Structure formats: C-alpha cells, structure tokens
Amino acid sequence: MNGQVYSATPEQVVQWIDPEATPWIEASRPLLVGIYKGECGCILGTIPASILGDSAYLWLWTPPVVPKIAFGRHAKQVIPKLLTLYSELICNCFNPDSARWLRSLGAIDIGPNLLVFRRK
C-alpha cells in the first residue's frame, strides 16, 4: 500500500492544518497523520470526553482532495486500535455522505448528527 498512519506531535501537524484547530490538536490523545504517496491525506485525533471517563470524541481533518480508497482501507485498521484505548469513540457528523461512511465502518446512530463506535 502507498499509505501509512503515523503518530504525530502538534508541532508536526501545524504545517497542514489551520492554526484555529490548535485546541483540537493540543487536546488529542493520540494524534495521528495519514500519509499517502508522500502527502498528508488526513489528520485525526481523539479528545477524551472527561478526565475520568473511557470515551473520546473522534475528529478528522482532510485536505480538499483525498484518495478515498486508501483512506478507507486504513480507517478499518485504525478504528479498532483506537477502541483499545477508549470504550467509545463519539462522532458529531453533519454530512450525510460522511455519516454513511462512518456507519460502514461500524458506527451506530445515537442521536441527531451523533454516531458512536463502541468496543465489543
């Protein structure tokens, strides 16, 4: 495959993502970067929902052009790994196509524009 997912630091991702998203970047545990053919294909992170909880909010940033097939293959591997860290990954999603994609990866609807991945 031409793509890989790497752990990253906030200092490494600011070259690709808008500095206004910095609070998300700084709060993410872990912070990951997807590289496809040497280019940034996505940045994602999980933000713990609370200090004592076992849930996290999952966020994703993608550049305007994303090779969806490569991205999809890696997402199927990354979600289960993140679920070893958190029992739930909560996703706020306002795009019908993105919601359909999240469901195809195993997310379930728990409210309007709200989906969740749960550890099995």
Image (cartoon, rainbow, N blue to C red):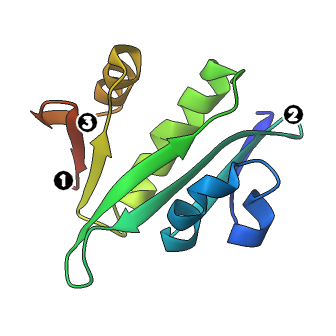
Give residue 20's position: percent from left, percent from top.
61, 55
The amino acid beneath tag 1 is Lys
Which structural element holds mark 2?
Answer: loop
Q: Residues within 10 Å of mark 1 (few under 14, many from 20)?
A: few
Disc 2 from disc 1: Cα separation: 33 Å
Q: Residues within 10 Å of mark 3 (few under 14, many from 20)?
A: many
The correct choice, above or below, for 79 with respect to 64 in the image is below
Q: Nearer the viewer, mark 3 or mark 1?
A: 3
Report the residue marked by disc 3: 107
Q: Residue at x 41, y 59 (%)?
A: 82
Q: Is residue 65 left or right of residue 44?
A: right
Q: Is residue 19 left or right of residue 30?
A: right
Mark found first going from the N terminus, 2 or 1:
2
Mark found first going from the N terminus, 2 or 3:
2
Report the residue marked by disc 2: 37
Q: Is residue 88 left or right of residue 62?
A: left
Q: Quadrant of residue 2?
A: top right
Q: What label does residue 120 carry, if any?
A: 1
Q: Most extreme residue toward the left, as rendered?
A: 111
Q: Residue at x 28, y 26 (%)?
A: 103
Give residue 52's position: percent from left, percent from top.
20, 84
